Amino acid sequence: MHRYLLHHILARTKFVAEGMVFPVSAAILEDIKIYRTVLEAYSLPLLDFIQWKETADHNVEILNETIDYYRFFDATQQAEFLHGCIKRTLEDIIPKEVDYLIRYDKFQQLLDDIVEMPNSMVALLVRFLEQHHGQLSLLARQKEFAALTRAEIKLIEKLYKDTFLDDCTV
């Protein structure tokens, strides 16, 4: 199902607000091989019945009538896959993302007590700390964060570990 159609259906049924993006694609990407298999379960057997040619711009032009192949097909397998993705999004992906955002905000607020920096630098700092399990690399210390003292870096690394790496409740 096309993602815009899914968003429209979810909004129309008041599951999500109109214009709100429901991040089901993250769940699909986690199972991209299964997604491909599910899509191909219906489409691959049809290829023998579809006449086509490649266009000048490397697209595909269908040469015969194919609407009957798609009008009333059994989409059970595809619907079950999508249902699993929506369920995982609601039960796992969104809660983890919300938890991360809460921790990020907490980190940023506590960081302001140590040193003030623009949001873009905070985001860069967090990315560097994520990449190195809570340690700021020597290169980052010398380049992007050269203005920080050794003591500030130690405090920031501890703050990051306490906020993101410890299994704490926020």
Image (cartoon, rainbow, N blue to C red):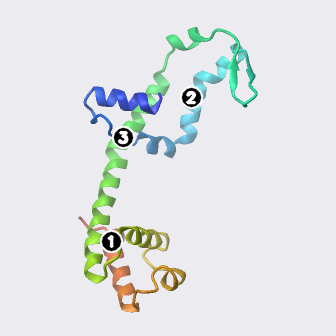
Q: Residue at x 44, y 43 (%)?
A: 27
Distance Cα–Cα, label 3 vs label 1: 30 Å
Residue 45 is situated, as x and y percent measured from the top left of the image, at 65, 19
Confirm or deny contact between disc 3 and disc 2 (CB under 8 A): no
Above or below, 132 relative to 39: below
What residue does disc 1 label? Answer: 166
The amino acid pointed to by label 3 is: Val
Above or below, 41 relative to 74: below
Distance Cα–Cα, label 2 vs label 1: 40 Å
Q: Nearer the viewer, residue 74 or 60?
A: 60
What residue does disc 2 label? Answer: 39
What residue does disc 3 label? Answer: 21
Residue 69 is situated, as x and y percent measured from the top left of the image, at 58, 12
Give left or right: position of 83 versus 65: left
**SS at badge 1:** loop
Residue 48 is situated, as x and y percent measured from the top left of the image, at 71, 16
Distance Cα–Cα, label 3 vs label 2: 23 Å
Confirm or deny contact between disc 2 and disc 1 (CB under 8 A): no
